Amino acid sequence: MAGAGRKNLAELDSALRTRLLRLDEPVDRSDWEAIVERSRRVVRRSRYRSLAVVASGAAVLSLAFALGLGLLSSGAGQPRRGAAPLRLALHLSGGSGLVLYSVANRTRFLDNPSESAAPVTASLVRSLSGGPFRVQPAVLRRATATRHVAGALMPGDEALVSFRLFTTAALGKTAGSAVLRCQYGFATSAYCTGAVDLDNGLRLTAAGTLDTGAHEFDLVVTSDYGRAV
Amino acid sequence: MAASREELEALYRERYLGFRRGLAATTGSYELAHDVVQEAFARALTQRQRYRGDAPLAAWVWGIAVRVAREERRTSKPAGSREVIEAELIEPAHDPELRDALRALPPRRRLIFFLRYFADMSYREIAAVCRISEGTVAASIAQSRASLAAALESGDLVESRLR
């Protein structure tokens, strides 16, 4: 074991080399599997630290991601030009938070027919273009025999919307993705829950109420990977 | 140019002892050095996308290991202790004369000597870790060897006269 992997010692004169080799050598305890396991813990730890740093009220963190809602013309390309950004603030404990910009790229909408509506109305899949996400019909996943009616949200309607997240309102650098599930209430509001996956590996879940006519809304971060904030 | 998992594994398997030996000189024990090596490679594995390929992979991992060693010193030593990484002989009792000769080297030169002959690193790797030129590494090592040879030779002379 002594001298293993010490080819550079050959440069030294023999007396010094012998004395260095006479010193105790570490025992080879290399264990690659232990490193792989440890790396998983490193990932978990860094995610927790990321959240802890963000959540720390003492730190003046203004991670100003911007969240706006734009549109993708074909589901997974670049945001459509002129899409109006809509800001989403994610609030963390301690008073700090994140603000992100987003672009909706997929959506499913489940309507809840009006009690007084004719039966045919029940088959409508209503557009979300009148709602807070401003999703255009081109982005909607169309079903057969559907027709889109702007601004026809009904209590109980549900929307599932996925977003690409960006760090700036210019939608330049991506920050991750998110999926929100919202159910519209009796007034002009909806209750939403969702998951936010950031590119740095942090996964957040969030919930909150939003005004269907607003250009920005707020969600409270409830956990990361099931860990309470 | 990210480092692949296989490259890191190969580096680890080939150089584990060198890393541990070199880190023991800066952490003060082989046990702690083993832990630092494990942590450094675990972090390298998770951060391998950040490796840009502008320095040898071993030097990049060494940079991580030095940071881990610093963190370890910060948590294990009282506040106010020096954060400078200094290399020391781990088994000084085995050869007190060699210990004294190594301690007589300036800290930076001593660290370079340990990286060369305990961690078995190339000039290029040492240059990348210490952020100096390869020429400076070579000059530092030559000076260290001359100093050690002189110190140990005079010690041998004293010893032979005492016999």
Image (cartoon, coloured by chain):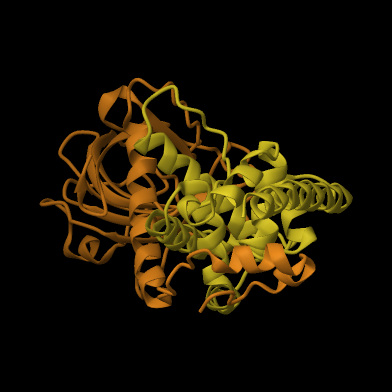
Taking the image as drawn, is residue A186 in sight?
yes
List the single residue furthest toward the left. Answer: A115
* Residue A138 or residue B10, whichever sits in front: B10
Q: In this view, does B65 lie to the left or right of A185?
A: right
Q: Quadrant of the C terminus of chain B?
A: bottom right
* Residue A77 or residue A13, whichever sits in front: A13
Give me the residue at 70% from left, 74% from top.
A7
* Residue A20 or residue A29, whichever sits in front: A20
Give me the residue at 82% from left, 50% from top.
B146
Q: Where is residue B130 in the image (x, y as percent from the top left)?
A: 71, 46
Chain B visual colour: yellow
The quadrant where residue B2 appears: bottom right
Q: Which chain is orange?
A: A
Q: Position of residue B3 (x, y in %)?
A: 63, 69
Q: Where is residue A138 in the image (x, y as percent from the top left)?
A: 51, 61
Q: In this view, does A82 lie to the left or right of A166?
A: right
* Residue B50 or residue B74, whichever sits in front: B74
Give me the residue at 24% from left, 34% from top.
A188
Note whether B146 is above or below B86 in the view shown.
Answer: below
